[in-house]
Image (cartoon, rainbow, N blue to C red):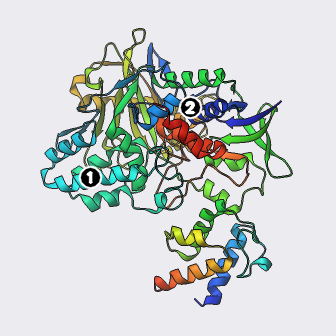
Amino acid sequence: MTEQEIVEKINSALAEEFELDLADMTPEAGIYEDLGLDSLDTVDMVIVLEGEFGFKIREEEEIRKIRTLGDIHNFVMAKKKALGA
Amino acid sequence: MTYDFVVIGGGVSGLSAAAILAKAGRRVVVVEESETPGPVMRGFQFSGSYFETGFHYAGALAPGEPLHRFFAYHGLWDELTPLSLNPAGFDQVRCREDGRRFDFPVGYCRLQEALSEAFPQESSGISAYLRAVRDAAAQMPFLNLEAQTDAGTLLGLTQGKTLQEVLDGFLTDRRLKALLGVHSLLYGNPPEKVAFGFHAGVIDGYYRSAHTLAEGGRGVVDALVRRLKEQGGEIRCGQGARKLILGGDGEVKGVALEDGARLDCQGCILTLHPRLLPRLVPDGVFRPVYKRRLQGLRETLSGFLLFGCSAGPLTTLQGRNLILLDSYSGSGDASLECRPLFVAGSPAESKREGHGLVAILPAKIEETAAWAESTPRGGRPAGYTTFKSEMQQRLLSRIERECPELVGKIGKCSGATPLTVRDFSNNPWGGLYGAGHEVGQFNPQPRTRIPNLFMSGQAVAAPGLLGAVLASFMTCGEILGHEQLRMELKRCS
């Protein structure tokens, strides 16, 4: 899966599950300020990513640091790389 | 008039949450669908005896322990009398496979000694395992008042190892592992599914102390109701909540009841099964992923229950419970006679009431699927009645086979099935403990996307009396401030 495909997969999944507008989903978009998620949505974000990519996310510290959509893209790509997939 | 909080659900969590808020000066009302508050916890009368349905024994009830502290906070100890179960063996496991018996003693030291005596080769593993249990339990906020409030709330608890994985890591003898996993009966989820940290939080209290209450579960409900009313709180029974009324700002403004009445409020606590929440809220309020998470919550096991009257006290069940195993490798999917069976005596030595026993066998609601459409109000079909009395007979025969000393001692019997559990606890999915706490499953937290709507109940924290009360403190901590509640709790003893 190319990086572009990963980004698209993340964006479309989050758009559907959180009812977001794909047009707003730039890497710079702040997930809290711009996309309107709140800290309560973190768990559901983890669930969506786990479901899409089939891995378990236990990196609590890294998840807490996520601020932008780009941070999510980078987190998933790093995770996939680490898993050798 | 506008209430500060409407609490939906008058079980232990709802009553406790309402009493906490009332004590803090909030104007609260509890809405309970059934005719009396605490219908599950309250137990019932049958043929002159009192039988427990929601409470059989509790850990953490000794002075200084969490549940004792919670009760002290509510001022319940004027009305409740703790009865210590036998310290040398509060739970006796009898296994048919090898005919052995094991008594769980009170206290980590004595438990370690007893386990090491029964399994000498595993002594060091036992010690390490029990230390792991104690350490994990110490991280639970509100159970340990010094623990971080947000510890283990996000990923740690639900993504860690299962109880079975931890048992396998420390121990080898399958009989020993089965013994240490047997208390998964207390929350209705097998060791392969439950998170170790969660198990530790539940079992730690029992390893420290085991009690019943002379007044039984009904005593807890009555005392909580009295405290709530003394502090100006109200209870409305006989009408469930039909809808939450939201304002333009997305906050709860009121609760519509089934009879059309409306209670205006500044906030709401919901203690129902979380899968019921989306039904009460207009579409589009919760994100699809959250709704699916709630609706996908997996259910704990249901059960077949037997309530048997006896002419006199049953010595075998005085000060202890029995857990009957067919083998050390039995599972919930096995045939009825092969599943673990929990047996407890009547709660109190009441002079006015008869004696008896309660037996609980894990079951799935699918086992009563043939009669799923029926309700107690509409009448159950004859086939169901026959099935139910056969179940009672099988449970009684098994108890008499495993406990010869009880033969002929049990007279009139009553029973319950997963359908009874479903219909009397307002849980359409019928689990004895509602939604379970499993590895990989994210249970709802007290806060929701609606800023002034909070959740509580055993799905939020943990099952049982301790879990239900604990949930109410976790939820009210979100409303009143965790630090303030913790300070007040520390002053209670």
Amino acid type at circle 1 is Lys
Q: Real-space Cα distance between discs 1 and 2? A: 42 Å
Image mark for residue B381: 2
Left/right of residue B425 with respect to residue A18 in the rendered view: left
What is the crowding at mark 1: few (fewer than 14 residues within 10 Å), some, or many (at least 20)?
Answer: many
Q: Residue furthest right?
A: B248
Residue B464, given in percent of the width and then of the height, sits at 47, 38
Q: Which quarter of the rendered picture does the N terminus of chain B lie within?
A: top right
Residue under the image location 53 percent in, 83 percent down: A78
**How many numbered marks appear?**
2
Q: Position of residue B193 (x, y in %)?
A: 42, 56
Q: A15 or B430, which lies in front?
A: A15
Q: Image point 42% across, 8% down: which residue?
A: B352
Q: Position of residue B356 (x, y in %)?
A: 37, 20
For residue B229, which quarter of the picture?
A: top right
Residue B456 visible here: no
Q: Secondary structure at mark 1?
A: helix
Mark 2 Cα within 10 Å, few/some/many (few <14, many 20+)? few
Query: Residue type at mark 2?
Result: Pro
Residue placed under numbered mark 1 in the picture: B177
Sequence order check, earlier mark of 1 and 2: 1
Question: Considering the numbered disc 2 on the image, is that residue within a helix, a strand or a loop?
Answer: loop
What subunit carries mark 2?
B
Q: B240 or B268, which is in the foreground?
A: B268
Direction from residue B160 to residue B226 in the image, left or right: right
Of marks 1 and 2, the one in the foreground: 1
Chain for numbered disc 1? B
Q: B395 or A26: nearer the eye?
A: A26
* Residue A33, x across and y down, in percent: 75, 69
